[in-house]
Amino acid sequence: MKEFERIPVSKVERATKFITTGAKIGTNYIKHYSKKLIDPTMSRDKLHEDNAADIYNSLSELKGGALKVAQMLSLDKSLLPTAYQQKFAMAQYSAPPLSYPLVVKTFKQHFGKGPEEIFETFSHKASNAASMGQVHRATLDGKNLAVKIQYPGVGDSIKSDLAMVKPIALSMFNLNPVEYDEFIYEVEQRMLEETDYHLELQRSMELSTQCKHIQYLIFPQYYPALSGPRILAMDWIEGMPLGERLRYGITPEVGTRLGQAMWEFYHFQMHRLKAVHADPHPGNFIITPQDTLGIIDFGCVKVIPESFYDVYFQLLEGDILTDVNKRDAIFEQLRFIYADDSAKDRKFFTGIFSQLVELLARPFRSDKFDFSDDAYFQELFAFGERLTTMKELRESKKARGVRDAVYINRTYFGLYNILHDLRATVDMRTAATVTRS
């Protein structure tokens, strides 16, 4: 795999890269429509492939916030064409890494010496690389370790990166500008927290300790003395990233066992800890040779405010769609609808969000839910595709939803997708409580 010798750090360098990428996308569109004049039946598949490759290659060189956005978008199977999903999903754990001299430079900045002076062995090649950092294997005192190194400059460039990626996101993915501006602040805050390895170290130790009682989960031990502002050391968990393991196949029994563990892990955090691992993508989990689930990354954690929790989880209560007064009160508090909406808008958005709540809350209505049900996910994805084409949503002058819901919704969406990939049947009765505590 190609390694990068440097990352563009200055705003000018990064802005130039975005402009160059935009120009390539424009050229791809010109080529597409020129060919379409000759062959009107030609599909947009090649255009999507070319654009996905150009965007991903540019973002891979930039790393940081822009590549993280691409990774997030890859989880939404209703938003992006398949070419984008497949290409952007590489940012989960197989992005092009930094070269070893840059890794050494990071160590010397924080420890005054290179990794080979600290560890008994340290791999020159990254074991995996994602949007914000990459992981190397190391050994010390008989222990196998995973050492995560943050890419240079990612923390300083997040705000400007998100501003520069905005035009691409709005034009290519039909996002609402009002909602983008409203929710990008939440995305920015979570990304800034991800670059704070002191915070990640603290949360990793606290959350893994609090969740260690959950069956079939394992967590690494963390090593503060070997960690720093841009370096995080922990035990190496033997196994295979979930995304890779899925390609080899998982038996229904194992899929259900791992899915049940994951369900209980997330709902214990939601309802007991009010702080949740908010980045459930296949690159953040390891399947061990014993078929247990290793949780390896607490970089993105959403702390759930009590006031939001009390309102949001009423959406899961059985009478939310039949008690009209309750429904409307909750929908207004979550800003699905507004008191000053026109009668037409109020009816439209109430209908849309009622459908969405019914779909997403359906698993909670059963004693057991089969996440391998393709019909359910086809319905879910089809509804998502409808949302992306609705003129009323794209052109609304008001943000429909609250910031605090961004990562909770994303967490559920990612969790559902993983449970579907695992073909898991989850016993809702034995899971950690899924009602308001």
Image (tube, grey):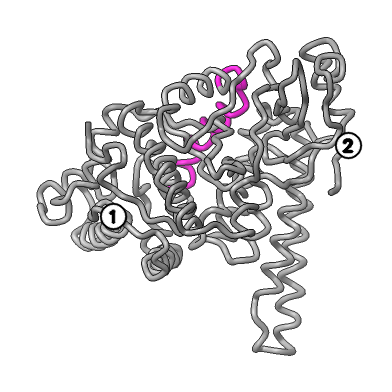
Taking the image as drawn, is residue 391 in sight?
no
Q: Secondary structure at mark 1?
A: strand
Residue 247 image point, x, y percent: 63, 59
Q: Residue at x 55, y 57 (%)?
A: 250
For this view, does 67 lie left or right of residue 390?
right
As drawn, is 56 to the left or to the right of 77? right
Query: From the viewer's perspective, is residue 229 above or below residue 122?
Result: above
User: Which quadrant of the structure image shows residue 429?
Assistant: top left
Q: Nearer the viewer, residue 139 or 127?
A: 139
Q: Which residues are magenta?
A: 179-199
| Residue closer to the observer: 228 or 61 | 228
Q: Is residue 191 magenta?
A: yes
Can you tell which mark lies on residue 386?
none
Instruction: Check disc 1 and report the residue beneath it.
Output: 368
Q: Is residue 314 magenta?
A: no
Q: Is 285 above or below relative to 42?
A: above
Residue 22: x and y, percent? 72, 56
Q: Earlier in the sequence, mark 1 or mark 2?
A: 2
Q: Secondary structure at mark 2?
A: loop
- At label 2, counting other C-alpha atoms closer than 10 Å, the crowd grade (few under 14, some 14-19, many 20 or more) is few
Residue at coordinates 79% horizontally, 52% vertically from top-left? 20
Q: Amino acid at mark 2?
A: Glu
Q: Which mark is residue 5?
A: 2
Residue 224 pos. (x, y %): 63, 13
Query: Residue, x 42% and y 23% (percent of image)?
Result: 210
- Quadrant in which residue 64 is drawn: top right
Vertical comparison of 345 with 108: above or below: below
| Position of the C terminus by quadrant | top left
| Direction from residue 300 to residue 158 in the image, left or right | right
